[in-house]
Amino acid sequence: MKLNKPKHSLFKNGMYALEGLIDVTKNETSFKWQLAGLFGFGIIAWSLPIDFAYSSILFVSLFIPVISEIVNSAIERVVDLVTQDYHILAKQAKDAGAAFVLLSLFVTLLIWIFTLLIAFELY
């Protein structure tokens, strides 16, 4: 069975990804907040008087909520494409995406807490 998919090059695929990133940035307020958190806490991570490795861990962990927000946006858009009417499965899909973002924030918070405890030798 042949799928009806056009052939893409690495360059075209990269451009599609960039278009998606630009679109999410323009149209999703929650994603803008995640980016603000990335930049704000990124400055904090690199400004702290801790080793480079600890700052790196803190900074990289900030991408977890950003990535999860992109996934949540994709889920919401697909659900909205399928139906604008209220349906319990649509609600559950959107709620699951929101839960994914919430858990990613919780994991990031835990990474920050444990990394800072170790970095400042407070354990």
Image (cartoon, rainbow, N blue to C red):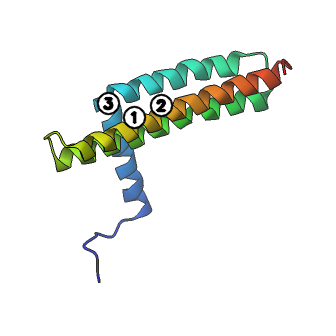
- Percent x, y for residue 107? 60, 33
In percent of width and height, residue 28 lies at 32, 30
Q: Within 10 Å of the Cα at label 3, are there few (<14), some (14-19), or many (20+) other Cα atoms?
A: few
Q: Residue at x 76, y 29 (%)?
A: 54
Say which element carries label 2. helix
- Observer-side mark, 3 or 2, equals 2
- The type of residue carrying mark 2 is Leu
Q: Residue at x 32, y 42 (%)?
A: 92
Q: Is residue 100 or residue 121 the one in the foreground?
A: 100
Q: Nearer the viewer, residue 101 or 7?
A: 101
Residue at the disc numbered 1: 98
Query: For the view shown, which residue lies furthest in the bottom direction?
Result: 1
Q: Which residue is mark 3?
A: 28
| Residue pointed to by mark 2 | 102
Label 3 – label 2 distance at C-alpha: 16 Å
User: Is residue 113 placed above or below 89 in the rendered structure?
Assistant: above
Residue at x-position 39% and y-position 57%: 13
Determine contact: label 2, label 1, CB under 8 Å.
yes
The Cα atoms of the two marked residues, 2 and 1, are separated by 6 Å
Instruction: From this view, report whether residue 92 is shown above or below residue 36.
Output: below
Which dot marks residue 31?
A: none
Q: Earlier in the sequence, mark 3 or mark 2?
A: 3
Nearer to us in this view, 11 or 92: 92
- Dividing the picture into quadrants, the one containing residue 57 is top right
